[in-house]
Image: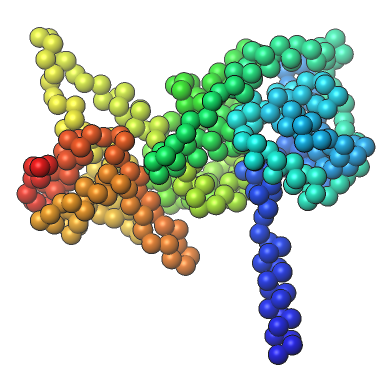
Amino acid sequence: MKQILMAIGCLLYVGSAAAASEGEYMAKVSDCVACHTAEGGQPMAGGKKFPTPVGDIYATNITPDKTSGIGNYSYDDFEKAVRQGIAKDGHALYPAMPYPSYAKMTDKDIHALYDYFMHEVPASAAKNKESDIPWLLSARWPLHVWNWLFVDEVQAAKPVTHVDKNDALLARGAYLVEGPGHCGACHTPRGVTMQEKAYDASSDIYLSGATIDGWYAPSLRNISMSQDELKDLLRMGRSQHNAISGPMSEVITQSTQYLTDNDMDAISFYLLSFNHKVAAAAAATPVAADGSLTYKPTDGKTLYSMYCSTCHGDDGKGKDFTVPTLVNNALVTAKDPSSLISVISQGAETPQTHGNISFKMPAYKNVMSKEEMNNVVNYVRGSWGNNAENNTGK
């Protein structure tokens, strides 16, 4: 019995040790190790080289070593460096560090990061390397001007309060992508002063694709895959029809594979939400010579194409083991279409079972009007041989 109890105790210890703290999790979401760890070097001890147009710079040691690292940083010092790009001694950091994105991070997440770096990361005495930028071009004061132009506005942005569950999922995805995940650092075009041309979804330029280090980071605004396939890519670097290559492979390895299911859902939901905007713009309402509409822009077929076909397919057959078919589906053809209407309005989620990630369908009650949802219902009920009666919507 004693041996059994000891074995159970060891298992509990291993399980608790394997669970990442909030700070470690946020460090993975923020992918700190990618920039602050040189190949073959100690984690977070710096030394990784970053070429720039004026010379090479090197990532700094951010372990809690008090001489070479950030062991003497107070929380305020740490917060200022992460969010504003200002080191403890007052010099401006190079914006190779994505602090314009980190400026959006919450106090809670910054505190968690600080605790992680101070108490969980092993200290390293590795010395920081000086940049290879010529001294005539190495002055830091212009970076304060750069921060004033491009960071202060992001720092001053007001968070939006969301109450609806669907809005909360979208808000969480936006926070992770625009903030700690700093996806725009690679996927958003940069201006002449190397600033990202946009830092959030309010601009059509944000996440519209960019070339970096000889690789093209594609646009994330028109992803043509299901939510589950996108999640597979972020989790494993491969999916049924796609695979990751280039610098994004490191992001998968060091960051996104560790995302929780909830955060994976939020990020994929947020990224796929851009498709609605693209589809809406592409489906601009045609106008005849006399100014009349040539078709009703809220017809069910168009709306299905915009919002449903990405997952369920133009033929309604869905995807095996992932997205249910709408052809001869009992919920679709039922005499009372209330359940179908609820699924479109409120969204749906398949059961979470061992070894299987649940599939979530987003809610569209804040995207489509009741009339538009009813038009989608009637299109689905009358297509692909379903031949169910129209719902009057009354």
The C terminus sits in image quarter? top left
The spot of residue 339 in percent (x, y) is 21, 53
Q: From the viewer's perspective, is 385 left or right of 123?
A: left
Can you name the residue that lies furthest to the bottom here? 1
Residue at horizontal 79 percent and vertical 31 percent from the top: 77
In this view, 193 is above or below 367? above
- Of 126 and 168, the residue lying toward us: 168
Residue at horizontal 71 percent and vertical 83 percent from the top: 5
Q: Quadrant of residue 375?
A: top left
The spot of residue 328 in percent (x, y) is 16, 57
Q: From the viewer's perspective, is 296 left or right of 73?
A: left
In this view, 179 is above or below 347? above
Q: From the viewer's perspective, is 344 left or right of 301?
A: right
Protein image colouring: rainbow
Residue at horizontal 73 percent and vertical 32 percent from the top: 79
The spot of residue 221 in percent (x, y) is 43, 30
Q: State the count of labels.
A: 0
Q: In which quarter of the image is residue 281?
A: top left
- Of 55 and 178, the residue lying toward us: 178
The spot of residue 239 in percent (x, y) is 47, 50
The N terminus sits in image quarter? bottom right
Residue at horizontal 86 percent and vertical 46 percent from the top: 123
In this view, 257 is above or below 78? below
The answer to whether residue 180 is visible is: yes
